[in-house]
Image (cartoon, coloured by chain):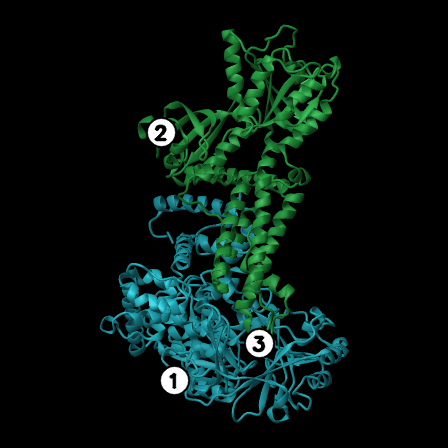
Chain colours: A cyan, B green
């Protein structure tokens, strides 16, 4: 068989991004997946984006990834979330036509130059002197390669639970991947086990829509990708209903056959995505729980019952769901279930997602303990980029916490102990005000372009946008408005009148004043034609200048700590003063910088200080002994 | 964010805590002189490097003398830390030491972390590389020591109050974050009016703790008590009764205590530095006049003054001098009036004559010890208002804790401002988060994971 540069194992959301980015960067790439027709399948909810996740999708797009473009082509219900808050936490979300999404993803993957799709299952790997040499397929053949990206989703020793019955499976109706975890643990990797779940799907014709509340999509829909002009696809509504005491009573009758409550499932599931039985037990006094009915497409009768994830036995699922208004006659096309799977705690990775144990081996997605398509895709593109960068002998691409949610994601994975599947939240980002979904292009496109994943056309569009923003910001800082122009408007806006010409910046800072309206007050000939996005960007920057400055100061402080590198040669066992707990964590994670060391759970402040002493000591020693080994 | 040393100015007591005549407070950092000079009578300049200057150290506002000190300025790099460093030798009184450190912190310095002076010395190349292990060991040991101290401190009601405050803040930070991270899940939102109320409540709690700081400092460091009265009114006898040993020379000849005499004693667990002064009277004697002047000079630095009169006869002209002094200083110092010699009889005229002063008054006999317990009660009551007497256990003592609480309050006030401007949640959250971080200097860090834990434990999240 041909030798590949990069082999990607898995055709989910991580695998797609990893394979496409490696192939586009000119590397001979293979994507190995169990079934070609399930590439891009949405295993759980039929939606992309959402709070904090929408930010990730925009960032993937700014780096030259695919997810935003696929959902823009196949979304059937777009909604911008958190519009009542400030722009920093607005987040796009879209329901997808599940089948269309999968087909669109396949079209892009199969049509990609340099990318060969192979049906099969990677069950082992070939390692030569600490470096990846190939992937072993289940039937025994070997795929020689220089780098291997594992994106196995829930397939590693996957086991599906429904009531007290359980069986090996990676996803409903699909076989699990056997042997790969063992191959990795044989190499010295540590593995753990996590759990996740999914709700039943009901037939659209069995829903009584007169008894549920309609949720209409945004009009016009706002696309995810910086390259998409307009969303063309027809839009659909979603619906809301609620459980009631009757539902809860019925669910309780099944608890003695729940794999969760009887202890059959030992792995930990996500607390932010609990099963319905978990909700009624933990929050017993809550009278009802919200249920979202999400259509899965135009030609697909399945409706996703969001909020009703369950691993109770089939009979209980069916009876309980029929107590919910609108679902009295629900026909269950598919049942809910829980799935347990192996993951590899990600402290074993470099921030490039390359493993520390085996060179040129990369992990992305649920194998790293995350949940969610967006989190997976974000890691996928970073693993693909970094594998390609390394093989092309170019510097790694590591985003930090002040640059991107992707940076927060990977940094958290490496430094925090993962106890449950990891999902992104805006509250995880300490520089939240700076990381907006609508400035992802300004933050990251330069990097995507530099690597070679972002095309000239969209890159230039971003540069023009940047220039326009700068021009308007200058105007706001330098232009004054006269009382004659401002006061009549001020009266309407409920704002205090001015007596002398006043700088625009000062006026925009008043909460009740909008920049768009201020611009209308200055003579048209001196007024450029600014896009609403530009006006919004500058308005935000002006109104919250103080807050942004404070965040920027924190970023600067953060960068200083990030820039204090901890050299590779440091030997934590040779520093007797370190506390035992800190030493253990430092040895486990091997942080690259003092900043990173400070974020590792369990590392004490005084130990950081001691560490600084040793770095300093070593620096002198290294400088005098040799000139080449200083990291 | 966890601590990492920077180029700020640090301050700490660098002589051992405990008994001794002189204590040394050290400040080190680039801003050392900028911070110190406004607080010193003689300003330090490069020309003064390595010269011991007899100096005066003032509080910042109002500018009052805290102590007479000796300052020595070491100019970088010729100092222990390799930075600008000033050693302030002051009198070894915990009260003075803490006031000096506190004043420096108010002016922009930071209380040093354990071992930080040594650490800076090392980082600035002032120590041999072979000493690195010793440096690390010092940091390690100091940390263990200060950890043990703060654990002791964090026991009891203080820690309870701090955790109440932390939970308060955590609760509404969680609610703010729910409105941001789970706004699509139909969870009850936190109305801004309620949020404002809750933040204001927390600010009150923080302020209550800050008030207790003064009380706590008195408890920990003791108070200064001055005994005033005409000659032979029984000042020295009273001091002896309070000390319960012969400290002052008690004699029948008026004017024995010509200068003043200090004694350390304890009143119900409260450390007291008592000063017995020369008698106050209209006098032609030069020596005694100086004594009176000195007694008066002691008043501003005293926490409380006991004014002695006689109980068996009405006040005379010498007593009148004292009454005038009380009238003049009653705004600055707390007074308790004591009618001594009750064993010789109680003349109602004596009490009546002092009534217009409207100050607490106790009849005692230093000779028979009659009324001494009442006097002790009156002293405590006058020093601490009722509220703080009740919250006796809840006190903030360390300068570091005080600074952290003040910075917490500042962040909460900013958050309150953001709420009043009707800012959106992510803006308000910036300062609420900051308040938690600053409180974290006492309680340990609150991570975003802690906030999420709080959310998941208390709210049904998840579609």
Q: Establish if B385 lies above or below A348.
A: above
Q: Point out residue B144 in the picture as x, y percentages from the top left corner.
A: 58, 40
Query: Which secondary structure lies at badge 1?
Result: loop
Q: Is residue A455 left or right of residue B344?
A: left
Q: Label 2, label 3: how many angstroms apart (C-alpha)? A: 69 Å
Q: Which residue is mark 2?
A: B44
> On residue A230, which mark appears?
1
Tell me the chain of label 3. A
Q: Point out residue A365 in the picture as x, y percentages from the top left corner.
A: 51, 73
Please say if the residues under marks 2 and 3 sit with CB atoms less than 8 Å apart: no
Q: Point out residue B37 in the picture as x, y percentages from the top left corner.
A: 38, 32
Q: Establish if A86 lies above or below B226.
A: below
Q: Residue at x 44, y 45 (%)?
A: B5
Q: Is residue A1 visible?
A: no
Q: Establish if A555 lies above or below A339.
A: above
> Mark 3 packing: few (<14 Cα in 10 Å), some, or many (20+)?
many
Tell me the chain of label 2. B
> Mark 2 packing: few (<14 Cα in 10 Å), some, or many (20+)?
many
Q: Nearer the viewer, residue A608 or B233?
A: B233
Q: Quadrant of residue A21?
A: bottom left
Q: Which residue is mark 3?
A: A154
Q: Is residue A66 visible?
A: yes
Q: Quadrant of residue B384?
A: top right
Q: Label 2, label 1: how many angstroms apart (C-alpha)? A: 69 Å
- Are the residues flagged by discs 2 and 1 from a single subunit? no
């Amino acid at each position: 068989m041909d030798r590949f540069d990069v082999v990607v194992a898995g055709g989910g959301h991580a695998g797609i991004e990893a394979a496409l980015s490696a192939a586009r960067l000119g590397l001979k790439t293979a994507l190995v997946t169990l079934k070609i027709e399930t590439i891009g399948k949405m295993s759980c909810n039929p939606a992309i984006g959402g709070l904090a996740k929408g930010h990730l999708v925009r960032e993937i797009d700014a780096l030259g990834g695919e997810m935003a473009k696929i959902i823009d082509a196949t979304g059937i219900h777009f909604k911008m979330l958190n519009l009542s808050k400030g722009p920093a936490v607005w987040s796009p979300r879209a329901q997808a036509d599940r089948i269309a999404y999968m087909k669109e993803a396949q079209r892009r993957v199969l049509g990609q130059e340099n990318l060969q799709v192979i049906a099969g299952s990677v069950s082992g790997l070939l390692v030569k002197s600490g470096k990846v040499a190939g992937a072993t397929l289940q039937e025994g053949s070997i795929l020689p390669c220089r780098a291997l990206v594992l994106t196995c989703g829930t397939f590693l020793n996957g086991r599906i639970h429904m009531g007290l019955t359980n069986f090996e499976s990676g996803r409903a109706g699909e076989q699990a991947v056997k042997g790969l975890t063992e191959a990795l643990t044989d190499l010295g990797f540590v593995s753990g086990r996590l759990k996740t779940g999914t709700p039943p799907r009901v037939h659209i014709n069995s829903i009584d829509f007169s008894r549920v509340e309609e949720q209409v999509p945004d009009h016009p829909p706002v696309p995810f990708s910086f390259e998409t002009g307009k969303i063309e696809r027809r839009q659909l509504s979603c619906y809301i209903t609620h459980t009631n005491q009757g539902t809860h009573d019925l669910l309780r009758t099944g608890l003695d056959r729940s794999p969760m409550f009887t202890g059959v499932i030992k792995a930990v599931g996500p607390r932010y995505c609990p099963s319905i039985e978990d909700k009624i037990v933990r929050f017993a006094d809550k009278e009802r729980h919200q249920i979202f009915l999400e259509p899965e497409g135009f030609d697909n009768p399945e409706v996703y019952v969001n909020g009703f994830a369950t691993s109770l036995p089939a009979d209980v699922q069916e009876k309980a769901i029929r107590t919910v208004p609108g679902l009295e006659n629900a026909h269950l096309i598919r049942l809910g279930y829980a799935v347990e799977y192996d993951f590899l705690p990600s402290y074993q990775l470099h921030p490039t997602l390359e493993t520390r144990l085996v060179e040129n081996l990369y992990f992305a997605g649920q194998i790293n303990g995350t949940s969610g398509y967006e989190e997976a895709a974000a890691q996928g593109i970073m693993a693909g980029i970094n594998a390609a960068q390394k093989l092309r002998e170019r510097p790694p691409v590591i985003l930090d916490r002040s640059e991107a949610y992707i940076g927060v994601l990977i940094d958290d994975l490496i430094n925090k102990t993962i106890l449950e599947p990891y999902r992104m939240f805006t509250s995880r980002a300490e520089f939240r005000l700076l990381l907006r979904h609508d400035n992802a292009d300004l933050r990251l496109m330069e990097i995507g372009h530099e690597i070679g994943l972002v095309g000239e056309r969209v890159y230039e569009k971003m540069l023009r946008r940047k220039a326009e923003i700068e021009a308007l910001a200058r105007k706001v800082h330098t232009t004054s408005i006269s009382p004659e122009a401002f006061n009549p408007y001020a009266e309407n806006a409920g704002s205090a009148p001015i007596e002398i010409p006043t700088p625009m910046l000062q006026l925009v800072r008043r909460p009740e004043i909008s920049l768009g309206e201020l611009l209308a007050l200055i003579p048209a000939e001196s007024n450029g034609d600014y896009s609403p996005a530009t006006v919004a960007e500058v308005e935000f920057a002006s109104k919250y200048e103080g807050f942004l400055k404070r965040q920027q100061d924190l970023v600067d402080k953060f960068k200083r700590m990030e820039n204090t590198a901890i050299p590779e040669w440091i030997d934590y066992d040779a520093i007797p003063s370190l506390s035992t707990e800190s030493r253990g964590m430092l040895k486990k994670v091997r942080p690259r910088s003092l900043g990173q060391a400070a974020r590792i759970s369990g590392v004490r402040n005084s130990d950081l200080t001691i560490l600084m002493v040793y770095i300093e000591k070593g620096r002198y020693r290294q400088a005098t002994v040799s000139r080449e080994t200083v990291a | 964010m966890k601590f990492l040393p920077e180029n700020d100015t640090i301050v700490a007591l660098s002589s051992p805590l405990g008994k001794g005549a002189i204590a040394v407070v050290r400040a080190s950092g680039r801003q050392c002189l900028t911070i110190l000079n406004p607080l010193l009578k003689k300003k330090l300049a490069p020309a003064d490097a390595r010269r011991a200057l007899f100096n005066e150290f003032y509080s910042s506002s109002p500018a009052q003398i805290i102590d007479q000190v000796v300052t020595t300025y070491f100019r970088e790099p010729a100092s222990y830390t390799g930075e600008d460093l000033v050693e302030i030798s002051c009198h070894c009184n915990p009260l003075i030491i803490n006031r000096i450190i506190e004043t420096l912190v108010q002016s922009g310095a930071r209380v040093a972390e354990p071992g930080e002076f040594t650490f800076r010395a090392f980082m600035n190349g002032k120590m041999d590389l072979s000493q690195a292990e010793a440096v690390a060991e010092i940091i390690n040991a100091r940390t263990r020591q200060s950890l043990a101290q703060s654990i002791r401190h964090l026991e009891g009601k203080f820690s309870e109050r701090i955790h109440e405050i932390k939970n308060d803040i955590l609760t509404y930070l969680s609610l703010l974050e729910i409105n941001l991270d789970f706004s699509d899940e139909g969870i009850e939102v936190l109305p801004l009016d309620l949020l404002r109320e809750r933040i204001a409540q927390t600010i009150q709690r923080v302020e209550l703790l800050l008030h207790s700081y003064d009380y706590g400092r008195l408890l920990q460091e003791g108070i200064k008590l001055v005994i005033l009265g005409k000659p032979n009114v029984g000042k020295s006898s009273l001091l002896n009764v309070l000390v319960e040993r012969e400290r002052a020379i008690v004699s029948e000849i008026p004017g024995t205590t010509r200068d003043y005499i200090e004694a350390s004693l304890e009143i119900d667990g409260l450390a007291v530095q008592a000063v017995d002064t020369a008698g106050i009277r209209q006098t032609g004697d030069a020596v005694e006049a100086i004594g009176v002047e000195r007694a008066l000079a002691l008043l501003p630095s005293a926490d409380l003054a006991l004014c002695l009169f006689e109980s068996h006869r009405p006040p005379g002209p010498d007593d009148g001098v004292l009454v005038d002094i009380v009238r003049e200083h009653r705004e600055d110092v707390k007074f308790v009036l004591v009618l001594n010699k009750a064993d010789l009889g109680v003349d109602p005229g004596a009490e009546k004559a002092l009534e217009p002063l409207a100050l607490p008054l106790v009849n005692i006999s230093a000779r028979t010890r009659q009324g001494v317990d009442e006097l002790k009660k009156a002293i405590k009551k006058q020093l601490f208002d009722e509220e703080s007497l009740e919250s006796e256990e809840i006190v903030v003592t360390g300068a570091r804790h005080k600074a952290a609480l003040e910075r917490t309050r500042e962040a909460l006030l900013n958050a309150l401002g953001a709420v009043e401007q009707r800012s959106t949640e992510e803006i308000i959250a910036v300062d609420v988060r900051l308040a938690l971080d600053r409180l974290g200097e006492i309680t340990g860090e609150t991570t975003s994971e802690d906030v999420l834990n709080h959310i998941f434990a208390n709210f049904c999240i998840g579609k």
